[in-house]
Image (spheres, rainbow, N blue to C red):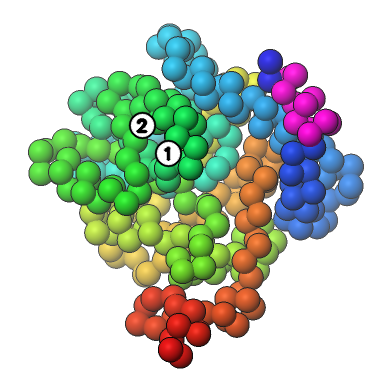
């Protein structure tokens, strides 16, 4: 079914092909047209797999899941729990991020495993993906606006938790507080909200690197960023995350989500239209009023 979807999406509908080609070409300017086309087609083949793999989580057996999804360094996460520290993981739209709802597969069932998400506009798809992301035992999904309240409640109840933050989306103008070099773009606007929560909760922070050994199989590797987030300078966790994500993408670019217009907001336009006043981004016209 995914192979058929690929033919429809890539060759007939040509879903966002111009956006994808531009993103890949600007991210890898030294690659030949043949190499760019290889990445582009490989991305669409994986993208077709993504939806069917995600939906399969609703019915996959535990034995089949353990065959197809492996975790590395889970013992480091459990050690943090045993030492009384909750865990935050930071990750990107790489490989099938829906399968990251399974990262607690090798942890004790008493641990809460959750994903922070932004509700989708389409209620049917929103409900579907909430079911997918909470399909594993002790799996929960929490809207980003509610996450701090949930974390505080878990801590008060003595429940150890690990939550994943997908943090490579393009923020809206009013949420831009940091620009970083990323994938050959010297200034990419990035979110910093996840880092603020991690510091407030004093979480141990891990980057989760996803890889795809072969079709339908994934490996999630925990890589420690810090156990003492408040010892790091402001935005350092975010900077380290984007550096690690870029290394992952460079290893195998086909499995990154290239369909988003990630670089549509520029620093020049931001400086022309907005300014930062007391840490808040406001439109210049509003400030003048």
Residue 239 on the magenta segment: no
Q: Is residue 135 left or right of residue 210?
A: left
> Do the residues under discs 2 and 1 have CB atoms within 8 angstroms?
yes
Label 2 – label 1 distance at C-alpha: 7 Å
Residue for point 47% across, 30% down: 124
Furthest toward the bottom, the residue is 288
* Along the viewing direction, whichever of 150 and 82 lies nearer the viewer: 150
User: Would you place residue 119 above or below residue 112 in this image?
Assistant: below
User: Would you place residue 220 above or below residue 64 in this image?
Assistant: below
User: Would you place residue 122 above or below residue 4 in this image?
Assistant: below
Residue for point 82% across, 56% down: 30
Disc 1 target residue: 222
Q: Is residue 53 visible?
A: yes
Task: Give, as a single range, the part of the protein colored magenta.
Answer: 3-13
| Residue 252 placement: quadrant | top right
Helix, strand or loop: magenta stretch: helix
Residue for point 72% across, 28% down: 45
SS under mark 1: strand
Residue 264 location (% of width, % of height): 66, 62
Residue 46 location (% of width, % of height): 67, 30
Residue 281 location (% of width, % of height): 44, 75
Q: Is residue 88 left or right of residue 29?
A: left
Q: Which quarter of the rendered picture does the C terminus lie within? A: bottom left
Disc 2 target residue: 74
Mark number, residue 208 = none
SS under mark 2: helix
| Residue 2 placement: quadrant | top right
């Amino acid at each position: 079914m995914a192979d058929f979807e690929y033919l429809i999406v890539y060759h007939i509908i040509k879903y966002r092909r111009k956006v994808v080609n531009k993103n890949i070409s600007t991210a890898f300017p030294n690659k030949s047209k043949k190499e760019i086309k290889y990445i582009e087609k490989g991305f669409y083949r994986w993208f077709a797999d993504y939806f069917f793999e995600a939906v399969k989580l609703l019915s996959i057996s535990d034995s089949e899941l353990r065959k197809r999804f492996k975790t590395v360094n889970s013992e480091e996460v459990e050690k943090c729990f045993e030492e009384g520290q909750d865990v935050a993981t930071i990750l990107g739209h790489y490989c099938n991020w829906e399968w990251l709802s399974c990262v607690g597969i090798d942890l004790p069932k008493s641990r809460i495993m959750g994903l922070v998400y932004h509700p989708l506009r389409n209620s049917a798809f929103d409900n579907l993906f909430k079911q997918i992301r909470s399909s594993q035992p002790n799996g929960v999904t929490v809207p980003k606006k509610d996450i701090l309240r949930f974390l505080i409640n878990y801590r008060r109840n003595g429940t150890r938790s690990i939550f994943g933050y997908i943090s490579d989306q393009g923020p809206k103008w009013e949420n831009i507080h940091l620009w970083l070099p990323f994938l050959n773009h010297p200034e990419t606007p990035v979110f910093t909200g996840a880092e603020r929560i991690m510091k407030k909760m004093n979480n141990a922070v891990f980057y989760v690197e996803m890889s795809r050994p072969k079709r339908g199989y994934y490996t999630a590797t925990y890589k420690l960023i810090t156990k003492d987030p408040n010892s790091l300078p402001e935005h350092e966790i975010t900077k380290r995350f984007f550096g690690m994500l870029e290394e992952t993408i460079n290893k195998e670019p086909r499995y990154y989500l290239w369909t988003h217009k990630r670089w549509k907001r520029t620093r020049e336009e931001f400086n022309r239209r907005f300014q930062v006043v007391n840490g808040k981004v406001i439109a210049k016209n509003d400030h003048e009023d």
